């Protein structure tokens, strides 16, 4: 780490540093460059584990964008996928703090890794006889499908990466969205590597 | 000096006597107890490896082995007692209530387990904390559901922020009533979740053996911390034959808890290279050195490299203050010379400390020329508050033992110029502080003088327990600490009211040493009900009450930062001598410097608890002081502002 040299306005009459007049400011931890991160936490499926993770995020002032929890192939092990924004050190802090939880087995940041990243959305859209066919086309364009059709509305089921789902939601908005639900991102590394395998007991 | 009660009952020379001797096994229901000898242990296992300790350990094991069969069936409450005994708990602090009565119902069957009835659950938690701090063992406290549990919360939080190994036990309403807003039901598990290292709710007695074994393992392993166990009343009453797990089984059952103890060899190499290059290195010793019992390793490292050692509030005692390399207490109320050394250092070797804001002030201006080696057992502490060049995750002792052989021997002569400069700074700063002005010579009773006298008259060998406020900082700066774990202070949470109950636990944990509690008039009025516990349980704590008739630290901030607006800084206190008298505690009073020594000595001579009421200067401030948000180079050293 190189310390950036910059003037500070504080009075440092007590400072007895080497013969410089303006001491360098200490760099704060982290680059300050905020990016999106996808963390996967493999946790023991014990009572309160979701509460512990959520409580930690709140108390440490980390902002979760989405959180999805599910079982894994092992009955007593769950998988949480957390997307959040922060700089490298902030996200590293999140994983280190997560590791402090007794029930957390493994944490990995998938940002920048080759992954499959998906979420599922159900979008209830206003539909009339006049535009229903058009909505079907839009859905097809995004490899989404209609899972419910009634007189006044349809439900579109869309799956894909976050930007892909964002895009179809934006398109459907012009027809009028009555209701929207998204599962939040889940992620899996491409290739044969497995975050779970090493933890199989 | 006015002696209000109790002629000194013989010299305190018996202090060490009986330390290793095994007391007669306390009989269950035979109060009043035989009058205790000063310093006598009650069913305590000396942890110092003496023959007595071995004998007691053996007796305990024998007792566990052929425990006489209970005339009734074994229930959850028995499992709790067995578990405590298995963990080597000899004393715990509790308060009964409806849902924990099943436990109190069986306690009599476990005479080796001493229960101290406190006067408030907060006191119980702090006592367990004080016990843990001086023994290095897990402290245990107990409360009932609802208000009993919430009263423990401040004590659990205090233990969390200072990484104290503690197991806090609460009862809860019967399982079937949970969630029904039953009488004295509160979601205590939800409350302690973010302020414990881990917590449990037990609804089935069969889970109790595993949960207790895990809780103790977690509390003391890696970075220590409090663990809370909430047990439903019906689980305490339920019959069970569940067996206690072995330590190996416990570890296997906690796959997510694998602290790292050994520093990474590559990082150690980098650290050694940094140390070889540094010309102005400073060691920052923190609480982790004490947790790891690494004081000898620290000394070996410092002596081999001739690097001066500064310490945090909780790192006091990591090195004896009379050692030539012991440089002083750092931070907000630290010595100017120490902060100055940090600000001019080119390398900080931080060991078991966490760059708390009371240590660094404004991080941007902290140690601007220094590269940092940071050793801590908790990876989350590294890079949290300051960016560091060399992160080393590991136990302070193991890291130091690995690092010392890797660094070159550097005699003091090789650092002569640097060390001489530091010595000059030190002489200057010690002479220029308010303390150095020697107001006590003119008859003013100042707090720093009292601290020095307490340190000297106890030969620096007592346990010194601080409360919070100016008294805490005076103690940290002026008592002169020579022994590890001789200083007990609520650093992280800064809990007023901590001192008296923590001293209670400390005195029981280490009865062979005198225990002094240094408490302000404000903090004393928060938990003074524990005076009665001292009497009932014959706990010989000596209380130094620093009565400045103020919330002194509040008044100091108001004077310096809030333009002298002293709203709510003045507080009335009772006649503390009469108060102590009402509890049956001898009290002594000192209003001038001349009265200090006789009052301390009189208190020492009392066989049991005693109180010394020091009526100290009302407006003495503790300087230097770093205003919050400012940097270590912005110390206020004197204040000539408006007088009251
Ligand atoms: C429980 C609690 N409440 C409030 C505070 C804030 N506080 C810090 S120091 C202080 C004054 C302490 O006064 P006293 O106990 O008389 O000690 P002194 O500073 O006078 O030595 C206060 C109110 C605290 N630390 N803890
Ligand atoms: Mg006061």
Image (spheres, rainbow, N blue to C red):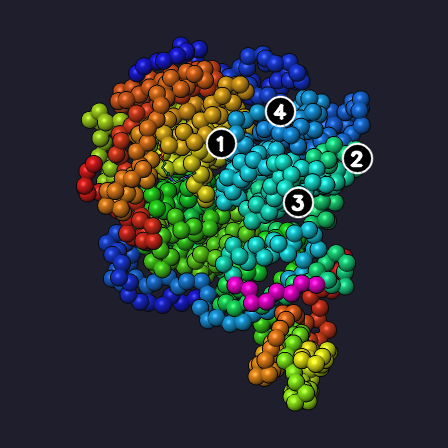
CA distance for labels 2 and 4: 24 Å
Q: Which residues are magenta?
A: A63-70
Q: Where does the image place residue A61, in percent across and percent down from the top left?
A: 49, 58
State whether residue A181 is above or below residue B471: below
Q: Chain of mark 4?
A: B
Q: Going from the N terminus, do you reach mark 3 or mark 4 first?
A: 4
Q: Going from the N terminus, do you reach mark 1 or mark 4 first?
A: 4
Q: Chain of mark 2?
A: B
Q: Which label number is shown at residue B114?
A: 4
The image quadrant in which ligand 1 is located = top left
| Closer-to-camera residue (B392/B43) | B43
Q: Going from the N terminus, do you reach mark 1 or mark 2 first?
A: 2
Q: Going from the N terminus, do you reach mark 1 or mark 3 first?
A: 3
Q: Which label number is shown at residue B179?
A: 3
Q: Which residue is mark 1?
A: B502
Q: Where does the image place residue B35, in percent across and percent down from the top left?
A: 55, 12
Indicate the quadrant where residue B40 lies. Answer: top right
Q: Are marks 3 and 2 on the same chain?
A: yes
Q: Chain of mark 3?
A: B
Please tell me whether mark 1 or mark 3 is closer to you in this view: 3
Image marks 3 and 2: residues in contact by CB distance under 8 Å? no
């Amino acid at each position: 780490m190189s310390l950036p040299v910059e003037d500070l306005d504080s009075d440092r009459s007590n400072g007895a540093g080497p013969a410089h007049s303006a001491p360098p400011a200490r760099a704060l931890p982290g680059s300050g460059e905020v990016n999106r991160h996808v963390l996967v936490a493999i946790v023991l499926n014990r009572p309160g584990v979701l509460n512990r993770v959520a409580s930690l995020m709140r108390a440490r002032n980390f902002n979760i964008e989405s959180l999805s929890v599910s079982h894994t192939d092992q009955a007593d092990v769950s998988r949480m996928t957390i997307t959040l924004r922060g700089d490298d050190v902030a996200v590293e802090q999140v994983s280190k703090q997560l590791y402090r939880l007794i029930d957390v087995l493994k944490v990995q940041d998938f940002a920048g890794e080759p992954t499959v990243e998906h979420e599922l959305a159900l979008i209830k859209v206003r539909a009339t006889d006049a535009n229903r066919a058009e909505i079907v086309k839009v859905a097809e364009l995004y490899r989404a499908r209609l899972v419910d059709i009634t007189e006044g509305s349809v439900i579109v089921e869309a799956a894909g990466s976050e930007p892909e789902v964002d895009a179809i939601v934006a398109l459907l908005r012009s027809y009028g969205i009555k209701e929207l639900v998204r599962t939040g991102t889940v992620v899996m590394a491409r290739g044969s590597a497995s975050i779970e395998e090493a933890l199989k007991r | 000096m006015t002696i209000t009660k109790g002629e000194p009952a013989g010299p305190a020379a018996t202090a060490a006597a009986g330390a290793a001797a095994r007391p007669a096994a306390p009989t269950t229901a035979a109060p009043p107890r035989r009058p205790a000898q000063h310093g006598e242990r009650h069913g305590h296992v000396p942890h110092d490896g003496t023959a007595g300790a071995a004998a007691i350990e053996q007796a305990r094991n024998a007792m566990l082995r052929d425990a006489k069969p209970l005339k009734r069936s074994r229930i959850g409450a028995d499992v709790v007692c067995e578990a405590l005994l298995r963990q080597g708990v000899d004393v715990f602090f509790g308060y009964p209530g409806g849902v924990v009565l099943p436990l109190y119902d069986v306690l009599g069957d476990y005479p080796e387990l001493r229960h101290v009835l406190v006067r408030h659950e907060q006191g119980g938690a702090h006592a367990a904390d004080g016990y843990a701090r001086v023994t290095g063992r897990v402290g245990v406290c107990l409360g009932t559901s609802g208000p009993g549990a919430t009263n423990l919360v401040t004590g659990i939080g205090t233990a969390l922020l200072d990484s104290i190994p503690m197991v806090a036990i609460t009862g809860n309403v019967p399982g079937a009533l949970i969630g029904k807003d039953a009488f004295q039901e509160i979601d205590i598990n939800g409350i302690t979740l973010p302020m414990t290292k881990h917590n449990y709710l037990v609804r089935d007695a069969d889970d109790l053996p595993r949960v207790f074994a895990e809780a103790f393992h977690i509390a003391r392993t890696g970075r220590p911390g409090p663990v809370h166990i909430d047990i439903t009343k019906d689980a305490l009453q339920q019959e069970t034959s569940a067996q206690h797990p072995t330590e190996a089984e416990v570890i296997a059952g906690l796959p997510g808890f694998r602290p790292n103890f050994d520093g990474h060899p590559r990082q150690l190499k980098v650290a050694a290279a940094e140390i070889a290059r540094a010309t102005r290195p400073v060691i920052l010793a923190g609480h982790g050195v004490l947790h790891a019992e690494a004081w000898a390793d620290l000394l070996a490292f410092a002596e081999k490299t001739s690097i001066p050692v500064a310490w945090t509030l909780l790192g006091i005692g990591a090195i004896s203050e009379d050692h030539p390399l012991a440089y002083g207490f750092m931070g907000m109320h630290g010595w100017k010379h120490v902060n100055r050394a940090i600000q001019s250092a080119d390398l900080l070797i931080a060991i078991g400390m966490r760059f708390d804001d009371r240590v660094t002030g404004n991080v941007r201006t902290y140690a601007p020329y220094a590269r940092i080696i940071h050793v801590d057992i908790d990876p989350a502490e590294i890079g949290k508050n300051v960016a560091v060049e060399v992160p080393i995750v590991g136990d302070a002792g193991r890291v130091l033992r690995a690092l010392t052989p890797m660094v070159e021997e550097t005699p003091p002569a090789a650092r002569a110029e640097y060390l001489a400069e530091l010595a000059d700074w030190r002489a200057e700063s010690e002479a220029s502080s308010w303390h150095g002005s020697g107001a006590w010579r003119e008859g003013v009773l100042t707090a720093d003088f009292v601290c020095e006298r307490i340190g000297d008259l106890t030969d620096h060998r007592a346990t010194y327990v601080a409360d919070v406020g100016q008294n805490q900082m005076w103690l940290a700066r002026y008592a002169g600490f020579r022994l590890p774990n001789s200083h007990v202070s609520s650093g992280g949470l800064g809990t007023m009211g901590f001192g008296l109950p923590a001293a209670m636990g400390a005195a029981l944990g280490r009865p062979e040493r005198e225990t002094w509690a240094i408490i302000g008039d404000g903090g004393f009025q928060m938990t003074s009900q524990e005076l009665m516990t001292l009497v009932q349980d014959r706990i010989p704590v000596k209380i130094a009450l620093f009565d400045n008739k103020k919330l002194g630290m509040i008044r100091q901030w108001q004077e310096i930062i809030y333009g002298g607006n002293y709203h709510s800084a003045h507080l009335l206190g009772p006649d503390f001598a009469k108060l102590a008298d009402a509890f049956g505690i001898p009290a002594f009073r000192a209003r001038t410097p001349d009265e200090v020594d006789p009052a301390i000595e009189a208190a020492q001579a009392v066989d049991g608890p005693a109180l010394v009421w020091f009526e100290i200067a009302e407006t003495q401030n503790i300087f230097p002081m770093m205003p919050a948000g400012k940097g270590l180079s912005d110390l206020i050293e004197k204040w000539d502002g408006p007088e009251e």
